[in-house]
């Protein structure tokens, strides 16, 4: 079951936390999240899963910045979200997708218990100018059935900023 927009609003501040919350960003069954003004880009041409890859910070000015196809940009939402009762899911808005802008390459699935800002994996099919604070994606909430463990990962939980891949930590103290 997916919560309706009215239920997201009713549970806001208790079972669901979205900060800041603006009722104008509420949809019939989701809540729009805005793009922060920072982006990260990887500096290396070839990324390595077993090590930390260097990134460079870009600031999106009020007049916008043009993204280039074939490059991955990491961004984050302006809103912090938290829930221990529902499975949060992230999707791009249809108006954004119709411009050929993807906000998550594969990681639109949240875990019950996640708290933090959403890191966005931004990719475009043609050059596009983006702006800070644009409502770029939407979060919606699934109920969960049965016993479950809350998300407790030390890698991404309670993040404050954009998080590049921390997959290299999975390789620590392991032989492959």
Image (spheres, grey):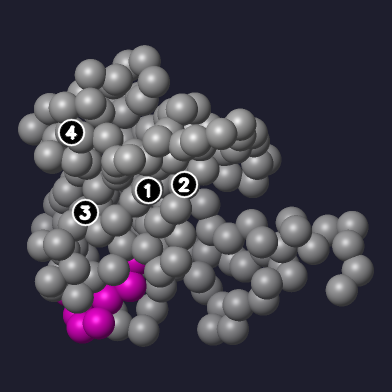
> Measured along the vertical axis of the image, is residue 6 above or below residue 30?
above
The residue singled out by tag 4 in the image is: 5
Q: Are marks 2 and 1 in contact (CB under 8 Å)?
A: yes
At which x and y percent is residue 148?
Answer: 61, 34
State the residue at coordinates (52%, 52%).
163
Q: Residue at x 56, y 34 (%)?
A: 146
Q: Residues within 10 Å of mark 1 (few under 14, many from 20)?
A: some
Query: What residue sits right under mark 3 in the picture?
Result: 136
Q: CA distance from mark 3 to mark 4?
A: 17 Å
Q: Is residue 5 left or right of residue 91?
A: left
Crowding at dot 4, Cα within 10 Å, few <14 / some 14-19 / many 20+, comes out as some
Q: Earlier in the sequence, mark 3 or mark 1?
A: 1
Start and end of the magenta stretch?
122-128
Q: In the rendered image, which residue does mark 1 sit on?
A: 89
Decide which of 39, 83 is in the foreground and name it.
83
Q: Which residue is mark 2?
A: 110
Q: Is residue 140 left or right of residue 173?
A: left
The verdict on residue 126 being magenta is yes
Q: Are marks 3 and 4 in contact (CB under 8 Å)?
A: no
Task: Point out residue 2 in the picture as x, y percentages from the top left corner.
Answer: 29, 41
Q: Quadrant of residue 57?
A: bottom left
């Amino acid at each position: 079951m997916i919560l309706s927009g009215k239920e997201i609003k009713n549970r806001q501040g208790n079972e669901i936390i979205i900060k800041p919350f603006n009722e104008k960003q509420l949809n019939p069954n989701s809540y729009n999240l805005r793009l922060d003004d920072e982006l990260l880009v990887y500096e290396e041409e070839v990324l390595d899963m077993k090590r930390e890859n260097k990134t460079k910070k870009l600031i999106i000015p009020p007049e916008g910045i043009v993204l280039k196809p074939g490059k991955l940009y990491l961004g984050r939402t302006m809103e912090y979200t938290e829930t221990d009762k529902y499975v949060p899911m992230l999707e791009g808005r249809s108006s954004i997708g119709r411009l050929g802008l993807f906000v998550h390459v594969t990681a639109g699935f949240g875990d019950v218990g996640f708290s933090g800002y959403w890191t966005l994996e931004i990719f475009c099919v043609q050059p596009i100018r983006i702006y800070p604070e644009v409502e770029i994606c939407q979060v919606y909430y699934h109920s969960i059935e049965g016993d479950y463990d809350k998300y407790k990962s030390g890698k991404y939980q309670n993040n404050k900023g954009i998080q590049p891949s921390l997959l290299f930590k999975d390789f620590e103290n392991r032989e492959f």
